[in-house]
Amino acid sequence: MENDADPRDLAVLYRIAALASEDESVAAAENALLSELMRAFPADSGSLCLLNPHTGYLEISKHHGLPTDTGNFALKLGQGVTGWATLHREPLLVPDVTLDPRYIAARATVRCEMAAPLLYHDHAIGCLNLDSDKPHAFTEHDLARLARFARQAGRTLHRIWQLDRLQRESAQLETLVELGHSLVARLEESDLLTTLTRSGRSLFDARLCTLHACDPSQRMFELQAWSSELSFSDSTLRREPFTAENSLIATALRLGKVVEFQELTGTTGHGAVDLAADPELCSMLAAPLLVDGAPTGVLAIYTNRPHRFSDAEKRLLAALASFASVALHNARLYARVFQSEESLRKTQTLTTLGLLAAEIAHEIRNPLTVIKLLHGALGTDFAPDDPRRRDLQVITEKIEQLEGIVTRVLSFARTPGVLHSRWQLAGIVEDTLLLLRAKLGQSGVQLRYTPPARPLHVEANKGQLQQVFLNLALNAVQAMPHGGALAVTFTEAATAIGAVVHIDFTDTGTGIPEAIQTRIFESFLSGRADGTGLGLGIAQRIVKDHHGELSLVATGSQGTTMRVTLPLRS
């Protein structure tokens, strides 16, 4: 700043610099800047032009005294007085615009024009332009003053834009974090999708947000959820499934990244099968949803104004899509856990009924054997016409019938050995824990899984072993109502019968009540009010069928350790 600057100019410079610290919007600050310059010079019109980094064009951001449609005016660098000053990063004065071929008329009565580039770190970011209806209205001294104001205006505008960007990104990040917590807590898929699209529209201040599910094998898309403005008619949305052909959102899946379409009203959106029949939709940003690397859908936002999406906005939508993918995956896993629990309960009931039937059949078989032996010792030398001969034949038939029923019940209750095959133990445990991942997260339980040092193989029925491991893990989670940790470890050991492996499930729960510790494997014994008392009893029988052992290693106020011991197959 020059030492001999006019005090009035110092006041203008101060007010321009002060705009960076005022709590106003970017548009209000830009308008205030232009108004300040209009008062400092004998100008009849003026404009603030900003360089669009995407198109390279100078676009009028604010103007005073120009026609209302001037806002659509855009210049290439070097074009016109404003474009020349921006390209060469030098102020320019045209005393009489009728004598300068560079002049492009924005208002018919303009006779004198001067322009000064807005610079930040020696890079042009825009231009200030002032017009007068009188020739030679501005002097070289006015041009030097304007250049001085423009240098300060460039620094001020950059700070204002930077602060606005940081505030918006901070608010978006805060919203995204809150949304992440909210999405994780959503267990119903329909509720999750509604929350997702509503939040997506709010984050981007968009007119519409949609989520389409896709079937990659069939290349089909179907609208699953959407959120729109109150004035938006849902009837304009395409509800029926459509193919990827002529679909805009399919591009996001095909490229595997966020894509944007700036002009939906032009040739870009012409013939698109997925575009809503709404003439106000102008621009679209779409992100793919990937679950375990597989495409499952597309999240898209639409604006009702032409909009060039910034890199930050693209990253934001990608983060939202990533949150959505994780939340959807968790919701589906949680649904599978509930289905597994329901299946386990049914299996427990059926197994218990089978065991009860086997026990009853076994108890019947003993007296039935005695009856059969005593009956065989009775004399059968009745006369052919003696009715007792016929009665004895009926008794013999019924005894054989009862014996057949008992044999079938006992055979049905016995686990067929042919269902056992060679399995890698770690794979069975890991598949079981995968089903529990969502439930562990919802219960605040941290999983600490330590895989074995080498592959361990067992001769087993995979489904039955998974039932055992699932039961032990669920019992552990239910013992930690306020969260905790569940550790699953493997230990190899040598015994008299050969090599075995211990699979320990250790929780940090409240422990098993002392009164029932010695009876936890009894049927219909439970430490919970809503328990059936069947799980551990059934689990123990399954492990025994695998020539193993299920045992309680330790329990107390610090937690419980349950151990499954199985023989290893070399």
Image: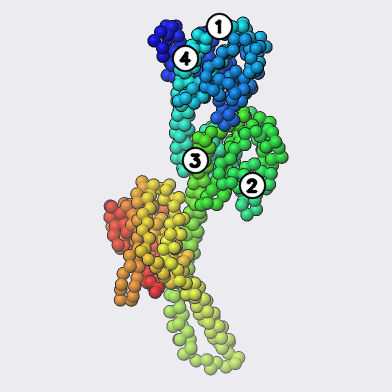
Residue at x 50% of width, y 35% of height = 312
Which element carries disc 4, helix, strand or loop? helix
What is the quadrant of the C terminus in the image?
bottom left
How dense is the environment of label 1, judged by Cα within 10 Å: few (below 14), some, or many (20 and up)? some
- What is the distance, in whole Å, between disc 4 and disc 1 at their CAs? 17 Å
Nearest-to-viewer mark from 1 and 3: 1
Nearest-to-viewer mark from 3 and 2: 3
**Residue that label 2 marks:** 221
Amino acid found under the numbered disc labelled 3: Ala
Amino acid found under the numbered disc labelled 4: Arg
Q: Pointers 3 and 4 in contact (CB under 8 A)? A: no
How dense is the environment of label 2, judged by Cα within 10 Å: few (below 14), some, or many (20 and up)? many
Residue farthest to the right, as pictured: 271
- What is the distance, in whole Å, between disc 3 and disc 4 at their CAs? 43 Å
**Residue that label 3 marks:** 319
Question: Closer to the N terminus: mark 4 or mark 2?
Answer: 4
Question: Closer to the N terminus: mark 4 or mark 1?
Answer: 1
Which element carries disc 3, helix, strand or loop? helix
**Residue that label 1 marks:** 42
Relative depth, front residue between 460 and 151? 151
**Residue that label 4 marks:** 148
Which element carries disc 2, helix, strand or loop? strand
